[in-house]
């Protein structure tokens, strides 16, 4: 499965990603950005799509400062191979392919579910 993610500002393409998935592991091949910080936003959006769809591992390739600044961590080879094998055997909930959406939809935390019997917020009582 090969996929791409693109970031747009209006009708202009400003960032993109090319990668592939095997099982619940997504591997980035390459990415680009044309507007400062748009690549970072695109990376965060990709991370959210992968997490929401049940991916266990995002292989970002070589260690680079900007990846570490976004929260990636470098792991020893033996540990990486262990995680890689488990992720490749697992199946994600859904494909990383998603409908077109605004990045804000991906970055905002999902609404919390209200338990039965709990009072809802924001309403007025009385009167």
Image: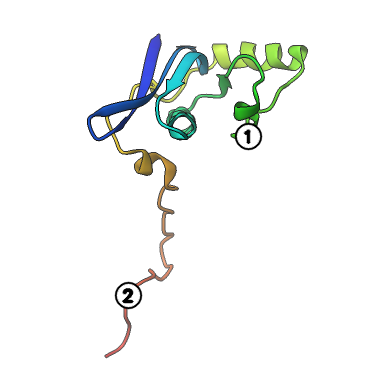
Nearest the viewer among 69 and 126 is 69
- The residue furthest bottom is 127
Vertical arrangement, residue 15 with respect to residue 29, above or below: below
Residue 66: image quadrant is top right
Vertical arrangement, residue 31 with respect to residue 14, above or below: above
First of labels 2, 1 by sequence position: 1
Q: Is residue 125 left or right of residue 119?
A: left
Nearest the viewer among 67 and 115 is 67
Q: Position of residue 68 (x, y in %)?
A: 65, 30
Residue 69, label in figure: 1
Q: Position of residue 42 (x, y in %)?
A: 43, 30
Kindly tell me whether residue 87 is visible in this rendering: yes
Mark in the foreground, 2 or 1: 1
- Disc 2 secondary structure class: loop
How would you rate the neighbour count of disc 2 (Cα within 10 Å): few for under 14, some for 14-19, many for 20 or more? few
The residue under the point 46% across, 27% down is: 50
Q: Which residue is mark 2?
A: 123
Q: Position of residue 47 (x, y in %)?
A: 49, 30
């Amino acid at each position: 499965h090969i996929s791409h993610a693109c970031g747009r500002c209006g009708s202009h393409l400003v960032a993109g990603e090319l990668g592939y998935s095997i099982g619940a592991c997504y591997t980035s091949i390459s990415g680009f950005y044309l507007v400062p910080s748009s690549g970072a936003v695109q990376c965060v959006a990709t991370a959210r799509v992968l997490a929401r769809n049940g991916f266990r591992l995002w292989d970002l390739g070589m260690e680079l400062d900007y990846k570490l600044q976004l929260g990636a961590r470098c792991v020893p080879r033996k540990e990486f191979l262990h995680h890689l094998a488990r992720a490749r055997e697992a199946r994600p909930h859904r494909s990383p392919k998603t409908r077109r959406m605004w990045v804000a939809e991906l970055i905002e935390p999902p609404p919390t579910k209200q338990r039965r019997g709990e009072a809802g917020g924001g309403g007025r009582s009385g009167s």
